[in-house]
Structure formats: C-alpha cells, structure tokens
Amino acid sequence: MPKVTFYIHVDQIPLFTCRLIARAIRDGGRVLVWSDSFGQVQELDKTLWQYEAESFVPHEVWTTEYPMPTDTPVLLAAGDRIPEIAENMTVLNLSDDFWNAAPVLPERILEIVGSSLEELAEARGRFAAYRKSGFHIEHHGMGGRS
C-alpha cells in the first residue's frame, strides 16, 4: 500500500526540502521532486547546489517529454500533467497535484506544508483524497522548524 507523509507547519520550506531529499536518498532510494512551476524547480536546483557542500545531493532537472533518467537519485521536474514513473520511487510533491490519480502510484509520497491557512486547507484536501484512495497516511507537526 502506498504511503503518504505530511510535514505540516514547516518554516523555511526550501531548506526543509533539501534536508528531506538528502534523508530520502540516504538509503539508496530515488526521489522525484514534482512541482507545477518550472521556476520553483530552477530555484530548488540552485538551492541543492548550495546545500551543505560536504554532503552533495546528486540531482538533475528532468524534462518530462524525454525518457526518465535512471542513473540519478534525485530528479527535479515540473509540468501540468503527472508523469509516469518507476514504481519504487518516492515523490516529493511541491505541487497542488493529487498523486493518488497518477498513471503509476509512487511507493511513497512526501508532502511539505507551510503554516498559512491556505496551505493547510489545500493539504487537508490532498489528505482526504489520499485517505479515500486507501493510502497509508502519517503526519508530522514541525512546529515552525525548518
């Protein structure tokens, strides 16, 4: 059964995103960071290059009209349509998309949520959709930590 983990009340989302990616690949996993904004992907690419020089996070920007690279642990991508992915991938969802309707369900989905009322309301909608689809759900209140 696919698993969704929500991290709520996150402060400094870009820094938290880098930490979460580094933790997700530590055990040899692969991560697709999905956004609905190419600008956000470019910013995250730059942030990952600057994130903790002693612990480089190997990554590349993937343009989804091309085949998915298989030799890079972290792929950054954006689009208006959820791409088909390998079954054993983790998706870090930075978009408003609902991955319970993906062509191939990810093994795990990570959702980062800030503290604004709008962000929390959108997260509640995704939470309900994942629950209705039978996903195992967990959440962590970050209390404003980054």
Image (cartoon, rainbow, N blue to C red):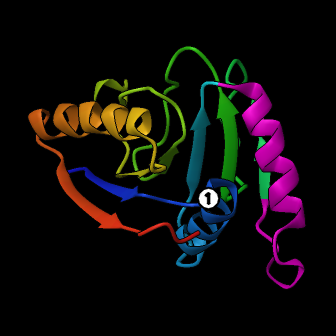
Q: Position of residue 43 (x, y in %)?
A: 82, 43
The quarter in which the C terminus is drawn is bottom right
Mark 1 residue element: helix
* Residue at left offset 53%, top offset 65%: 29
From which residue to which does the magenta span run? Answer: 37-58
Q: Position of residue 117 (x, y in %)?
A: 38, 38
Question: Would residue 30 be counted in the magenta stretch?
Answer: no
In the orientation shown, which residue stands out farthest toward the front? 117
Q: Position of residue 140 (x, y in %)?
A: 32, 67
Residue 37 as seen in the image, left or right of residue 48: left
Dividing the picture into quarters, in which one does residue 59 lie? bottom right
* Residue at left offset 42%, top offset 69%: 142
Dividing the picture into quarters, in which one does residue 123 lie? top left
* Residue at left offset 47%, top offset 42%: 86
Is 89 rendered above or below residue 56?
Answer: above
Q: Residues within 10 Å of mark 1 (few under 14, many from 20)?
A: many
Q: Tag 1: residue type? A: Thr
Q: Position of residue 111 (x, y in %)?
A: 42, 49
Is 73 rendered above or below residue 2?
Answer: below
Tell me if residue 130 can be seen: yes
* Residue at left offset 82%, top offset 56%: 47
Q: Main secondary structure of the magenta part?
A: helix
| Residue wearing tag 1 | 17
Residue 128 as seen in the image, left or right of residue 112: left
